[in-house]
Image: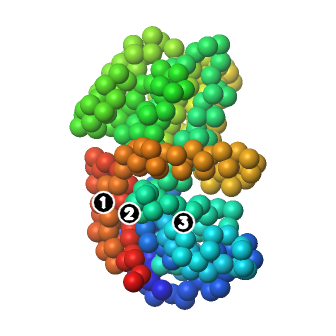
Amino acid sequence: MRAPVFLSHGVPAEVLELAEIPNPGPPSPGQVLVRVLARPIHPGDLLGVRGPAGAAAGRPITPGVEGMGIVEATGSPGDGPPPGTRVAFFPAPGAWGEFVLARTEFVVPVTQDVPAATAALMLVNPLTLGMLMRAVEDALRDGRRTVVQTAAGSSIGTLVNAAAHRHGLRLINLVRDPAGAQRLRTRFPETPVVTTTDQDWPDQVRAAADGDVPVVLDAVGGELTADLVALLADGGTLISYGQLGVGSTALEALPLTRRELTLRGVSVGRWRLLPSEQRAEDVAFATRLARERPELLAVAASYDLGDLAAALDHVARPGKDGTVLLTSPIPE
């Protein structure tokens, strides 16, 4: 089968190549074999490729954990959706290949009314949203509902914007460029947007928040962390769920103890460890979102798996709106 692979960590466009590798083999009990038709390129996928730059991977590794496709075979009769079923899946390592083995508990049947592109995006980001909202609710105290979020124009940032009213949050969006700020103001006109290229952006945030920021949702990290921590009210919480930024901030440079601040990480990679009841609730929400609000699962562009270089180039474009997909032809 065709699959993007890398032999050493580094810049994705430099270390990833499309190769012919063996099929995964027949599924074991508790697994299904999926012919993958569409898979997203998530920032987390590319972070995994970058890894410690120059370090050997030890073997060819195929990125990806999410996608949609058609069940080809099951590990045993009645074990998961039958062959021919359209499914979304997460987590399933190696999802960028043409075939992938997925555990039946992480495979979700998808009806024909949900387009393939939507189904390919219906799990990771909505599940991340659920985890973030639970972390936010846990961090908010004393009736304070103000939340500042970075990377507000990203795919997850868009979902947070859509969910803010439902959760009664007073959201303030941070973006890097004026064009992204204008897109957000057009789409969510009642939510303040601040551009971090403005020299006085922290003062703008404090004015929009009336000086009180109990929670920051951060997908950027790096050198921006110190400025975000400075925005927090005493006793506030910085919730980190991404590493889109550059540089770093030393932990000991932050006034965590003196101001009783909390740093909390959230990773969708740990979603599989949640109780089955919570996972079922999250998947039900994701399924409803895919059917009722597909516009929130926006696709920037779709590229055939053979156009890997063009897809990676598109991912790196400033101002990209939505997620780039890698696709494979539907079998006849």
Residue type highlighted by circle 2: Leu
Q: Position of residue 241 (x, y in %)?
A: 55, 43
Within 10 Å of the Cα at label 2, are there few (<14), some (14-19), or many (20+) other Cα atoms? Answer: many
Labelled disc at residue 67? none
Disc 3 crowd rating (10 Å Cα; few below 14, some 14-19, many 20+) is many
Callout in the foreground (2, 3): 3
**Mark sitting on residue 325:** 2
Identify the residue at image location x=52%, y=61%.
Answer: 110
Image coordinates for residue 85, horizontal then vertical, percent: 55, 71
Q: Which mark is residue 87?
A: 3
How far across and how far down the image is residue 178, in percent?
25, 34
Dot 3 lies on which element?
A: strand
* Residues at marks 3 and 1, CA–CA distance in whole angstroms: 21 Å
Q: Give the mark nearer the N terminus: 2 vs 3.
A: 3
Look at mark 1 in the image and give the residue it sits on: 301
CB under 8 Å between discs 2 and 1: yes
Dot 1 surroundings within 10 Å: few (below 14), some, or many (20 or more)? some
Q: Is residue 3 visible?
A: yes
Q: Determine contact: label 3, label 1, CB under 8 Å.
A: no
